[in-house]
Amino acid sequence: MSEVPTFAARYPFGLDPFQREACDALEAGSGVLVAAPTGAGKTVVGEFAVHLALATGTKCFYTTPIKALSNQKYGDLVARHGSADVGLLTGDNAINGDAPVVVMTTEVLRNMLYAGSDALRGLSYVVMDEVHYLSDRFRGAVWEEVIIHLPESVRIVSLSATVSNAEEFAEWLVTVRGETRIIVEETRPVPLYQHMMAGPRLYDLFVESPVGELSVNPSLVRFAREQVQVARTFDRRPARGGHRRPGVRVPSRADVVERLDAEGLLPAITFIFSRAGCDAGVQQCLRAGLRLNSPEERQRVREYVEQRCADIPEEDLAVLGYFEWRDGLERGLAAHHAGMIPTFKECVEELFVRGLVKAVFATETLALGINMPARSVVLEKLSKWNGETHADITPGEYTQLTGRAGRRGIDVEGHAVVLWTEGVDPLAVAGLASTRTYPLRSSFRPSYNMAVNLTAGVGRDRARALLESSFAQFQADRGVVGLARQVARNTEAIEGYAEAMTCHLGDFGAYAALRVALRDREASIARDGARQRKAAALASLEKLRPGDVVRVPTGRFAGLAVVLDPGLDEAPPTPQVLTEDRQVRKLTAESFPAEVVALGSVRVPRGFNARSPQSRRDLASSLRNLGLPPGERPRRGRSSAADDTEIARLRRAIREHPCHGCADREDHARWAERHHRLGADTEVLRGKVAGRTSSIAKTFDQVCSVLTQLGYLDGETVTAAGKQLSRVYSESDLLVVQCLREGLWDGLAAAELAACVSLLVFEARGPGDSAPKIPGGRVRDVLREMAALYGALSDAEADHGLNVLRQPDPGFAWAAWRWASGTRLETVLDESDLTAGDFVRWVKQLLDLLDQVAAVADPAGGVRAAAREAVRAMRRGVVAYSSVV
């Protein structure tokens, strides 16, 4: 008898056709891939897998990409099935791990597979929620590892956002998992209407014609053109002091919330691509006096918040901004971003779902799977900082963000609102709203931990075969077809170029080859000269001393400068100098393309204060008093190419070649240059074709070569060091175990070890303005040794054509050391450039790695004890407070 009717009866609304089709396929013994828009209800299919496991006395693992989503799903399933049948396993929590249904992060399941965990016995279903995460370049490989390594008897339920290549992904799933049904649902259960808000007016983005076709609202297009004309007219007029530019004013955040409230469009999420902007949005609404909750609702909010936050130490409440945050919640307003501690974010999520928070200002991380739908979504801007530049959001990102609008079973329609600002084209917004291209691209690549685990489990040959079955290789092999076609087209064109450069006086191909050889030789000599000059410059930088006067030859700070600090602690040195115009700057090696010579010396006063304008003036005056002449243009020395015998030989051969005297020589040469350039490009394409065939397995071989060189593998045997490595799951896995093997952390106290290990988990959000503060003494020495070890491992990788390890980042060392030493949260945050949420997140990641270090370190040594002590010392206060309801 089918379980589908029994399951469907538990829901207040009937199953949609796509949900029923997926449930039927799963019950019939097929795996399923469900690709559907946000809010369409694809998780219902995952919950049916849970129902089947409980009904048949087997197990189901429900995996998610992030801990917050695991925590939320755990709460949902406990509410439905009871705490006895549901467990949770994340890096932070282990609750009822032997239950028939366990929610976990995907990494936990991957680690179980490699360890051959007994928990896998009786496993019949695995739900992979948000499976499109396998495109994530940092963590996506985990999904493919799990899909490849799960036993054949396990049925996989893959739940994905709408992607444009779902068929390709499903085709791969069939090759590695057997029968898999693909169910693609394009229709949202709650229709989404698109708008633009210009000043106080809310325009529909699309209008429907009498025949039912949608087009961009002509009134909106006309308004945008009028605003462009107003701006141009104003810009052509002479500037007038104090005159504000005419035109429609962009509404404030409080104005937007009030307008949405008046239109009945709350609750709403406003996406702002900055944490500071989210916090500012709440403050602006509070200053405007917005109160979206009734007195009874305010009381319910206060009771809930006080109950949820009761375990947070009272001394930390003020530094966490608890009282201001609670005031905003009571008024129905909140921010949501990664800078908040987990408890605060979870309170916002729960109160929003309960209808007690009406307006949330959030970063895009909220769109990554957390169940927090709204009636409306507002986008302030259509561009965001991607870590390198401000880039326009993609149609896929637009769909993901606006997909939060429209609550199933509550709203009859959802609304997406884009704020009009100068330069925004309604036609471009319409393009974003109507494009449905979100391709799934594999980010899979073998890691060191993966290599030793695979070798230990199935041997090198079988491991290579498994890796060649990855989605990455599947996509690469399909791409070879297009490359091969391009090679064929290029080859045909090359033959035509060869005919066009034919010369009646001789072999023009040979003549052209001489010209190319001469050009390459001259370029090689020029590069060698540049390298020699750079080496001389670096060597001279290491000789600088405080007080030396140098000439900066290039860049913004060209001119005379006095050295304040030679910067010898860094490699290459980065001297800090005072320029002639009294600016204190750190210079890089790029500022000195040639050897640096001290032109003189001035006395730098003891305790010189670079922040004091008077101190800078006095020292700059001493610099000018030296009376050094202005810089001269560097004299050109005799070119080394003039003395090169090979260049002389090539020039002579060119002059003596018969084709050199051809009247059409340069015309032939142009065809020869095209022949040469296209030939070189074609060889690159041929290399790509060859490289893509078994490219993943070749990378695996390169990884194994590094591991063999370093003693982790001995042929097919995993050594003792390799077994250590197999239990370390980190981007810096190899560096962690090398530090243990070479004794770099021996003798460190708990807080010192925490500081050193933090380099292997922390990654700054952007380049810092200055060098991070780090503890002194033994820690500073160990950090230098770790940097040298990283350099040696990077060289070993380069020798084998790899670039896997991430450079250690000392930006969290001071905070980790202080927290592990027992320092109060307020003090640690004051001394670092971290929000409370970032601090908690990095500490939890550090605790996870310290637990792994304790597990693999030599029991007889002191590192294991120090790691465990560090974990105990750091798991306190807001870090220790559990985020699971």
Image (cartoon, rainbow, N blue to C red):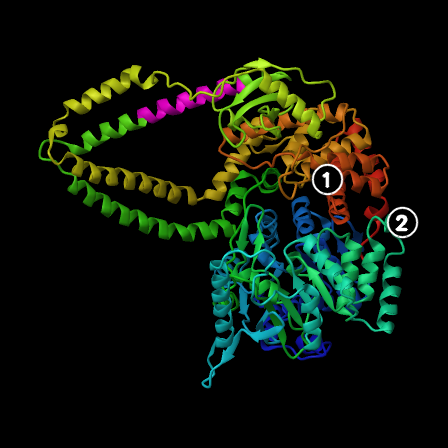
- Residue 416 in sight in this render: yes
Give the vertical position of 182 relative to 862 (above or below).
below
Q: Position of residue 305 (x, y in %)?
A: 85, 61
Quadrant containing the C terminus is bottom right
- Residue 29 in sight in this render: no
Residue with the most extreme bottom position: 210
Q: Hey, what amino acid is under mark 2?
A: Pro
Give the vertical position of 720 relative to 623 (above or below).
below
Q: Position of residue 584 (x, y in %)?
A: 63, 29
User: Residue 92: within the magenta?
Assistant: no
Q: Tell me what residue is drawn at x 77 percent, y 41 percent.
A: 847
- Quadrant of residue 40 within the rendered picture: bottom right
Q: Nearer the viewer, residue 120 or 809?
A: 809
Q: Is residue 40 left or right of residue 876?
A: left
Helix, strand, or loop for circle 2?
loop
Q: So how many labels did they put on this image? A: 2
Q: Nearer the viewer, residue 93 or 304?
A: 304
**Badge 1 is on which residue?**
849
Quadrant containing the N terminus is bottom right
Q: Is residue 132 left or right of residue 468?
A: right
Q: Position of residue 136 (x, y in %)?
A: 58, 51
- Quadrant of residue 794 within the rendered picture: top right
Give the label on residue 313, or none. Answer: 2
Q: What secondary structure is the magenta-colored segment mainly? A: helix
Question: Answer yes or no: do the residues labelled 1 and 2 have beta carbons within 8 Å?
Answer: no
Q: Hey, what amino acid is under mark 1?
A: Leu
Q: Position of residue 455 (x, y in %)?
A: 58, 38
3D distance between C-alphas at marks 1 and 2: 25 Å
Q: Name the front one of labels 1 and 2.
A: 2
The stretch in magenta equals 521-539
